[in-house]
Each structure stands twice: as structure tokens, then as C-alpha cells.
């Protein structure tokens, strides 16, 4: 066996031996990742339900938004989030709010005479000490 072939086999052996350790490391990283906060929203002329919800800063958020009647828009300008909401389809929006505060969201697809009233807010709270 040539020295190149021997090195190749040694490298493969080391890589295979490292797999269990990498698996443990990966599980630890996943175990430390915070569980996402799931929020379900319904968009319907001319409101979001719920119109206000609370989440924790630094923790991932998953919004599942369903429109019941129209292609509404979901826009949260301060967090640079935007999505179209086709009726009958769950639209998923993922983000991690970093700073506590109150952030407004609104429908940005004109949906009728009370369109301007279709808004809500997210309250981002500081993480518990």
C-alpha cells in the first residue's frame, strides 16, 4: 500500500470515528436552541385575530397566518417582515425579535372600505431574568 493510500484510509477512519462525537455536539446545540413561539393569526376583512399577541425577545417566533376571504397582506415594517396571505392557505412567517417593544402590523393589500382598520400589534417582552 502506498503512503497516499495509507493516508487516505487513515483520514477516512478518523472521519468515521468523529461522527459519534459530532452527533453528540449537534444534539447539544439543538437542545440549547429555544423552542419557537407559535402564534396563529387569522386575517379576515377587516381585522386580524388576535389583534395583539406577546412574545419573548431573543426567542424564535413562528407565525401561522390564515386568510379566510381575500389575499390580504401582512406587513410589520419595523421588523422588516412582509407576506401575502392567499385565502385558505397557512402562510408561515419566521423571525426572532431582538429588542423588547411594541411593533405594529397591518394589511397592505387594499381589501375594502375599512382596510385602514386592519392592523394589530406584537408586544415583545424582555426575557425572564
Image (tube, rainbow, N blue to C red):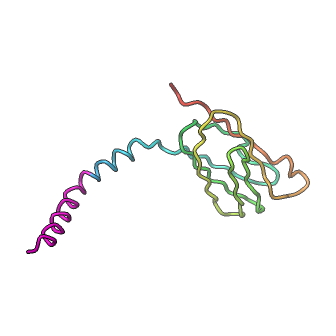
Q: Magenta region: which residues?
A: 1-21
Tell whether position 11 is magenta: yes
Residue 126 drawn above or below residue 69: above
Q: Quadrant of residue 101?
A: top right
Front position in the image: 107 or 90:
107
The secondary structure making up most of the magenta span is helix
Front position in the image: 78 or 62:
78
Q: Residue at x 77, y 48 (%)?
A: 106
Front position in the image: 99 or 3:
3
Q: Residue at x 73, y 59 (%)?
A: 68
Residue 8: x and y, percent?
18, 69
Q: Residue at x 63, y 33 (%)?
A: 100
Task: List the single residue furthest toward the bottom.
Answer: 1
Residue 62: x and y, percent?
58, 49
Q: Residue at x 59, y 51 (%)?
A: 94
Q: Which quarter of the rendered picture does the N terminus lie within?
A: bottom left
Amino acid at each position: 500500500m502506498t503512503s497516499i493510500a495509507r493516508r487516505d484510509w487513515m483520514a477516512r477512519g478518523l472521519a468515521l470515528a468523529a461522527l459519534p462525537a459530532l452527533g453528540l455536539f449537534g444534539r447539544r446545540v439543538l437542545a440549547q436552541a429555544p423552542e419557537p413561539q407559535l402564534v396563529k393569526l387569522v386575517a379576515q376583512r377587516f381585522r386580524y385575530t388576535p389583534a395583539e399577541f406577546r412574545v419573548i425577545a431573543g426567542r424564535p417566533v413562528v407565525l401561522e397566518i390564515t386568510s379566510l376571504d381575500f389575499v390580504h397582506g401582512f406587513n410589520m415594517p419595523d421588523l422588516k417582515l412582509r407576506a401575502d396571505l392567499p385565502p385558505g392557505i397557512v402562510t408561515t412567517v419566521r423571525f426572532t425579535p431582538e429588542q423588547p417593544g411594541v411593533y405594529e402590523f397591518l394589511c397592505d393589500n387594499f381589501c375594502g372600505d375599512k382596510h385602514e382598520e386592519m392592523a394589530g400589534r406584537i408586544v415583545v417582552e424582555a426575557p425572564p431574568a
